[in-house]
Amino acid sequence: MSNIRLLLGTIIIVIALVAQFYKKKFPENRDFLIVFNGVLQLVIYTKEKNAILFTYPPAGSVTSTGLVVSSKLPRFSDLYTLTIASADPKSISAGKPVELTKSVTQWFTKDGVLVEGLFWKDVETLINDYATEPKKKK
């Protein structure tokens, strides 16, 4: 997916360069930019969704698939959701997705400074929750 995105981005850059040095100026030749930017946005919206990171499997993990980290912060809300899921949810080794939903106010001081240690502690807990093998019922 990232290769397709890079290819589309390259095409958009080439078209932007052509548009820059073309005889007609921007308002008259923007249709090309709009079309290809729309294609890129469509790919991002349909394939990547809220993903911010695609990874290889974590070291020592029982899964053989990569991970997708996605985040969501709805408009006018302070509740931030961070999700870790398998890149291939249909795989037999895919783990169940884990999710952390917390108010962003718990990671910031009164002055609006991010306390990275608190945020990373929650992220590490989420990673550990995903990495632990589910206990088998007896």
Image (cartoon, rainbow, N blue to C red):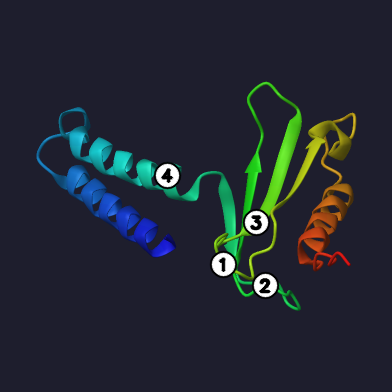
Label 2, label 4: how far apart the Cα atoms are: 25 Å
Counting residues from the start of the chain, the first of labels 3 and 2 encountered is 2
Per the rendering, the mark at residue 91 is 1
Residue to which mark 3 is pinned:
85
The disc labelled 1 sits on which kind of residue?
Ser
Per the rendering, the mark at residue 63 is 2
Which is closer to the viewer, label 1 or label 2? 1
Counting residues from the start of the chain, the first of labels 1 and 3 encountered is 3
Q: Residue at x 48, y 50 (%)?
A: 48
Per the rendering, the mark at residue 46 is 4
Q: Are marks 1 and 3 in contact (CB under 8 Å)?
A: no
Counting residues from the start of the chain, the first of labels 4 and 1 encountered is 4
**Residue 82 vs residue 28: left or right?**
right
Label 1, label 3: how far apart the Cα atoms are: 12 Å
The disc labelled 4 sits on which kind of residue?
Thr
The x and y percentages for residue 85 are 65, 56
Label 3, label 2: how far apart the Cα atoms are: 11 Å
Counting residues from the start of the chain, the first of labels 2 and 4 encountered is 4
SS label for mark 2: loop
Q: Are marks 1 and 2 in contact (CB under 8 Å)?
A: yes
